[in-house]
Image (cartoon, grey):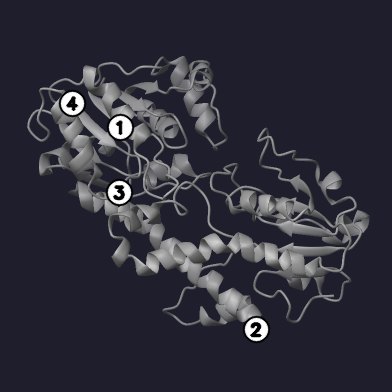
Amino acid sequence: MKKICVIGLGYIGLPTTAILALHEYKVIGVDINEKILEKLNKGEIHFTEPFLGNIVKTMVDKEKIMGKTQPEKADVFIIAVPTPCKEDKSCDLTYLISAVKSILPYIEKDNIIIIESTIPPGTTDGIIKSIIEEKTKFKVGHNIYLAHCPERVLPGNIIKEIVENNRIVGGCTRECSQKAANVYRAFVKGEIFVTDAKTAEMSKLMENTFRDVNIALANELVTISNHLQINGLDVISIANKHPRVNIHNPGPGVGGHCLAIDPYFIIEKAPQLSNIISTARKVNSSMPHYILSNVKELMKDIHNPKIAVFGITYKGNVTDIRESPAIEIIKLLENENFKISIYDPHVQGENLNIVSIDEAVEGADMILILAAHDEFKNLNYINLIKTMKNPIIFDTTNIINLKNYDNTHINIKNLGNLFHNSYT
C-alpha cells in the first residue's frame, strides 16, 4: 500500500485525504492547527461537507488516515495549503513555501511532490523547484518528480466532483506529469489532461477568471439597466434566448476562495496586459457599494431603519464565508449606522451575532437577501413580514419568484429591477 502525506487539511486537503484513503492509500494528514488534528483523529471533520464525515470516520477507524503536526516519509507528498492575496493583491506564497520546506527532510529518491494550491504561472517551475533542488540532493525530473495539479471542485459537492471531474496535471518535465497523473488515476473517473506546469497553473486561474469576467458583465448590465429604467433580468432572460449567448446571473458581488482571488494572480504577472480582467475585478468589487447605495435610497425616508440580512455566505447553500461580499456589505451598512440583524441557516459560530429568523425580521424595515439559500426561495414572505415596520424585501440574489407576489402588498425589489415596475 502506497503512503501519501497531505499537507493542509482545509476545504481541499481533507476531502483529498479522505478519497485517497478510500482508494487504498495510507494517508498522513498534516496541519498546523491542532484542533483540526484532534477532530480528525477522532474521526470527525471541522467543516460541513456532504458525505465527507462518514468517509473520514470509516477511514480513521480502519487506520488508513492519521493526523499529525509534522510530515513523515512517504511515496507521495500533496500540498494543499491556502494561497491568499496580500494587501497589494499579489499572491501570498508564505504557507506554500513553508509547507514545501517542511517536507524537505523527508524526501527520498523517486518521491512525487504535487502542488494543489492555486498559484501564479511559473511558481512550480521557478520557486518550488528551486527550493527543492537547492535544499536537497535531488534533481527534479531525474530522481524526484514535481507537478501542479489544481483542485477543480465546488463546495457542497466536493466528494462527487473530486472523483468525477476532469483533472489537469502539469509537471516540470514530461515524466513528472506522468508520475503525478498516475496518482490521480487511482480514483479520478474524469479525464486527466497532462501538460506542463505553467499551462496547468494558468488554466486553473483562467477557469475562475472566465466566470469572474462574465459575472462582471452581468453586474454591469444591471447597473446600466437600472440607470435607464430597464429590467436587467428581463434583458438577460431575453438575450439568453439567442443560441450563442449565455449571460451569467448578477449578484451582490463575488466571493469564495477562487473567483475573488485567482484573477489577481494573473494580473500580478502581466498588469499592463490584463485590462479586461482588471476591469472585471473592479466591477465585481464595487457591487457591495452599489448595494449599499440602493439600500440607502430605499430607506431614505425611514427613521433609524433596521435591516434584516438574510445569508452571509459567499454563495447559496454553503457554509463558507470566505471573501463573502455579504460580510463587506454588513460592514458598510454598520458604518452608515444601520441597525443590522443577521439570519443564516447555514452558518454557526462565526461571531457575527446570528439570530433566528423571527428575531431578525421583528421590527425590521427591510429584508436584504445576500445569499441564494434554498430556504429563502420557499419562504412565505406574506406571513414573514407581519412583524416588520416598513416591509421592503431587497433580493440581491434574485431567488424570489416575483410572480408569486403579484397583486400583494409586499414591496419586493431585486437587483435587476430596483426602481422600475415596482411590485406593490
**Residue that appears at 66% across and 63% down:** 291
Secondary structure of residue under mark 2: loop
Sequence-first disc among 4 and 1: 1
The residue mark sitting in front, 2 or 4, is 2
In the rendered image, which residue does mark 4 sit on? Answer: 111
Secondary structure of residue under mark 4: loop
Asked if residue 237 can be seen in this view, the reply is: no
Secondary structure of residue under mark 3: loop
Asked if residue 393 can be seen in this view, the reply is: yes
Left or right side of 253 for 83:
left
Look at the picture and state if 142 lies above or below 279.
above
Instruction: Inspect the image, locate mark 1, and give the three-letter code of the amino acid beneath it.
Output: Ile
The residue mark sitting in front, 4 or 3, is 3
Q: Local crowd at mark 1 within 10 Å, few (<14), some, or many (≥20)?
A: some
In the rendered image, which residue does mark 1 sit on? Answer: 97
Q: In what quadrant of the picture does the C terminus appear?
A: bottom right
Contact between labelled residues 3 and 2, with CB atoms less than 8 Å apart: no
Distance from disc 2 to disc 4, alpha carbons, whole Å, reads: 60 Å
Contact between labelled residues 3 and 4, with CB atoms less than 8 Å apart: no
Sequence-first disc among 2 and 3: 3
In the rendered image, which residue does mark 2 sit on? Answer: 230
Instruction: Inspect the image, locate mark 4, and give the three-letter code of the amino acid beneath it.
Output: Asn
**Residue that appears at 81% across and 65% down:** 299
